[in-house]
Amino acid sequence: MADSTAVSEKSDLGPRQFDLDKCVHCGLCLNACPTYRELGLEMDSPRGRVYQMVQVAAGAPITSSYREHIDLCLACRGCESACPSGVPYGRMVEHARAELEQHSNRGWFATKLRNFAFLHVLPSRSALSVAGTLLYLFEISGLKALARGLGQMKLLGGLSDLQQLTPSAEPPFFFSQIGRTFPPEGERRHRVAFLAGCIANFSFARLNEATIRVLQRNGCEVVVPENQGCCGALHLHSGMREEARKLACRNIDAVLGGGFDAIITNAAGCGSTLKEYGELLADLPEYAEKAHEFSRLMRDITEFLSALELNPNLSPVDAVVTYQDSCHLAHGQRIRKSPRQLLAAIPGLTFVEMSGADICCGSAGIYNVVQNEMAMQILASKMKSVNATRAGIIATANPGCMLQLQAGVRLHGSAQRVMHVVELLDLSYKNSR
């Protein structure tokens, strides 16, 4: 791992020794790792990365080679599901990236751009609204369609795949609904808080609305807390741990004390981080207890609905559907049955399980942007499994996965529709009217 860019300084942000010691190097994680499946390289497997973390913790220098192998990890946590020793790999790679962030050596422009996105856009509702408006203007001007057309002809070079991942803007944006309370249909069974996310407010506004409608149909009073914001998941996965902690405190202050039976998210990637606020803030005396209470109340929308006596007033949805497990739902939150149970509850729907449903699609937060080549390679493999099912709809439970799979359909698919599980439930309830 030695090279001329080695950094010798030690940091207390790296993976904890008691976590590192849990790995017995058995190799059962290898086949669960998307990068190892694609490359077949030990250093790009969970076992290989843990070995490198151990060396750095023991005093080895942080090198550009070490950085490349850690950065190439999707942090999908598939290895955690395969590990017999309970290695908390997700936590370990987050700490490793926080340590790397301390020693980052980006250029001036890259640093400014990164800080602008993470520190000024994602946490700001007004900045996100401007970003969504600009994206909408980009679309209606015809420039987005032109860019995608040029991408299909490979005239954009390295930007060809990146432009496929550009989300769509969905006006009216969901920002106007933040702060509102939505009454239940019929008798109130639960009072819940809904966390609307950040980018989802302009790129998945209809999904957020569908989520609220489905909750209402199931007797929930839905409150969208006013002072909520970005959950910090993207920051945490990118090594910006302190910023993630600030965002966590903001959400806890916005939600706790509202008398909620549950706090709901429809984004599996966000939910994994939201459920780990207790761990993230464990060393902050004024927030530690509140963070654990917040995490105790957190529920993924599929988890929450599957635990209810679901409103049975559903009408048939005549479609063949396959399901892609969102990594942070299946591996981070260990929720696999709930989405499938909800799909099974929809009459008329034919469900076909795909092979390797819980192998990452390549989205992984902003991984598909910063590691685009590998993300697209993983996506191509995923689409082979999707196409083999001959399903017309690909269901999943995470907006980031939806964007990735939509790109997969454009590049490798056969006009499949990508939908969130809750959108299918909402469609069934709408038909019943």
Image (cartoon, grey):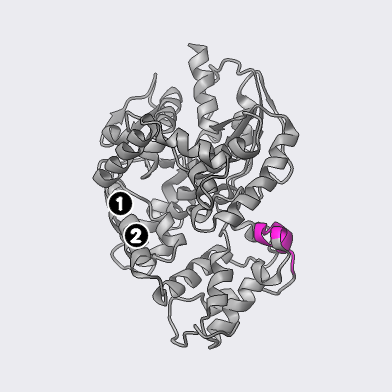
Quadrant that contains the N terminus: bottom right
Q: Judge by depth and name the residue closer to the eye, 363 or 302.
A: 363
Image coords of residue 46 (percent x, y)? 65, 67
Q: Is residue 227 visible?
A: no
Tell me the amino acid under the disc marked 2.
Leu
Residue 113's disc number: 2
Q: Position of residue 104 (x, y in %)?
A: 42, 74
Label 2 crowd (10 A; few <14 / some 14-19 / many >=20): few
Q: Please give the name of the residue rendered at 61% of the width and 16% of the height, measured from the top-left corner.
A: 316
Q: Which residues fall within the magenta stretch?
A: 27-38
- Element type where label 2 sits in the image: helix
Viewer-side residue, 333 vs 210: 210
Question: Sequence-wise, which precedes: disc 1 or disc 2?
Answer: 2
User: Does residue 221 appear to the left or right of 16 in the view shown?
Assistant: left
- Tell me, yes or no, whether the two marked residues, 1 and 2, touch with CB atoms within 8 Å: no
Give the main secondary structure, helix, strand or loop, of the magenta stretch.
helix
Relative to 224, residue 282 above or below: below
